């Protein structure tokens, strides 16, 4: 075999090994669903530095679960959410029966109404998505909080995909195309909001997103799909349905995590670098979680950076 051919082959082997090593490092570093035990303390009792180090762990892993957080909504839960910046009030037209009368910053997730009755046949957010897709970048740079109050006897899990590791695992040709791709999002394309009129929800009628962004804290690229019915527009004029991309991602079990709730679980995740889906299957078994969102301000972002350096 000619010497130049051996050199080329060796270089290709080295390149492949380096790619595998990069993938290994990323997958090893991010442990979605990392369990955090505060030793009987509430998250609201943490000091500033300890709290921000916990939030840094959220970015590192994409998703953490803080156990045994039986929090008062006002004194504990809302006070924690506000530590990172602004919270958004959910407009009544989108809240519907999920309304929490005294806390417009919170959204009830599940089939349990405010009066304690169970809504039959309830389904919500049982599709792959990232929240805040009706806001442009970087307004969708959100920390999500999900506090488990009542867990169903069956079903009710939430599934997650690591959008950073996913981008590293897919084939190079597709990844390169995604780096320059975009999609157009409309609120009424979302299954749960399809009947809501534009003048009622107050969001832009349509908004464009890139499919790949650079993470503001981690300085790494992440995959952004918004909602599973979106259609990706590539620079060469071709298109790809997000559902087809999701089929590819679901073929990599190492980037998937499904959380089965216990009462008092507090899930905290990085909205932009993870993709999630409600798995349903709880039927008429009571299920209730409270969702809050922290829209990280530039001040809190700088504070976080200063503490973790």
Image (cartoon, rainbow, N blue to C red):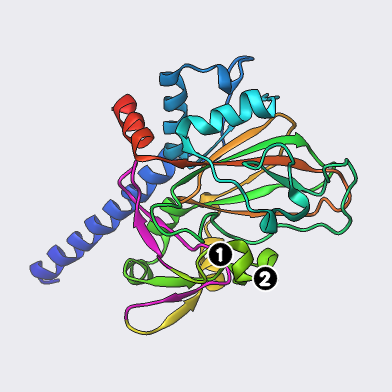
> In the structure shown, which secondary structural element does the residue marked by tag 2 occupy?
loop
Magenta range: 208-235
Q: Within 10 angstroms of label 1, few (less than 14), some, or many (20 or more) residues?
A: many
Q: Is residue 197 above or below residue 123?
A: below
Residue 125 in sight in this render:
no
Q: Residue at x 47, y 16 (%)?
A: 47
Residue 87 horizontal side relative to residue 176, left or right: right
User: Residue 212, how many percent across, how many down?
Assistant: 37, 61
> In the structure shown, which secondary structural element does the residue marked by tag 1 occupy?
loop
Quadrant (top left, top right, bottom left, bottom right) of the C terminus: top left
User: Residue 286, how many percent across, how many down?
Assistant: 85, 43
Mark toward the start of the polypeptide (1 vs 2): 2
Residue 151 horizontal side relative to residue 126, left or right: right
Q: Residue at x 43, y 45 (%)?
A: 27
Q: Nearer the viewer, mark 1 or mark 2?
A: 2
The disc placed on residue 194 is 2
- Which residue is denoted by mark 1 in the rendering? 227
Quadrant for residue 39, please give it.
top right
Q: Within 10 angstroms of label 2, few (less than 14), some, or many (20 or more) residues?
A: few
Find out whether residue 231 is within the magenta segment. Answer: yes
User: Residue 217, how many percent across, how many down?
Assistant: 34, 41
Quadrant (top left, top right, bottom left, bottom right) of the N terminus: bottom left
Residue 55 in sight in this render:
yes
Q: Residue at x 9, y 69 (%)?
A: 4
In the image, 135 versus 219, the foreground residue is 135
Residue 88 horizontal side relative to residue 49, left or right: right
User: Residue 165, how many percent across, how many down?
Assistant: 43, 52
Q: CA distance from mark 1 to mark 2?
A: 13 Å
Find out whether residue 44 is within the magenta segment. Answer: no
Q: Is residue 107 above or below residue 227?
A: above
Quadrant for residue 127, please give it.
bottom right
């Amino acid at each position: 075999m000619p010497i130049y051919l051996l050199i080329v082959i060796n270089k290709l082997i080295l390149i492949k090994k380096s790619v595998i090593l990069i993938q290994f490092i990323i997958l090893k570093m991010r442990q979605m669903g990392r369990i955090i035990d505060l030793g009987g303390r509430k998250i609201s009792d943490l000091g500033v530095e300890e709290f921000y180090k916990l939030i840094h762990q959220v970015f590192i892993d994409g998703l953490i679960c803080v156990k045994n957080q039986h929090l008062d909504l006002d004194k504990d839960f809302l006070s924690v959410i506000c530590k990172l910046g602004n919270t958004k009030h959910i407009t009544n037209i989108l809240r519907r029966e999920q309304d929490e009368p005294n806390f417009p910053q919170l959204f009830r997730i599940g089939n349990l109404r405010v009066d304690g009755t169970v809504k039959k046949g309830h389904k919500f957010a049982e599709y792959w998505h990232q929240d805040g897709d009706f806001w442009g970048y970087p307004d969708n740079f959100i920390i999500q909080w999900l506090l488990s109050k009542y867990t169903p006897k069956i079903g009710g899990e939430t599934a997650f995909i690591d959008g950073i590791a996913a981008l590293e695992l897919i084939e190079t040709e597709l990844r390169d195309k995604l780096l320059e791709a975009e999609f157009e999002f409309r609120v009424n394309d979302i299954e749960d909001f399809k009947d809501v009129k534009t003048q009622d929800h107050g969001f832009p009628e349509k908004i464009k997103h890139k499919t790949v962004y650079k993470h503001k804290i981690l300085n790494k690229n992440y995959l952004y799909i918004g909602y599973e019915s979106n259609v990706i527009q590539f620079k060469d004029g071709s298109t790809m349905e997000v559902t087809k991309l999701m089929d590819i991602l679901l073929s990599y079990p190492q980037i998937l995590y499904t959380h089965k709730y216990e009462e008092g679980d507090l899930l905290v995740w990085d909205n932009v670098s993870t993709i999630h889906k409600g798995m349903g299957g709880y039927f008429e078994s009571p299920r209730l979680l409270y969702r809050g969102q922290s829209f990280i301000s530039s001040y809190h972002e700088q504070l976080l950076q200063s503490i973790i350096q």
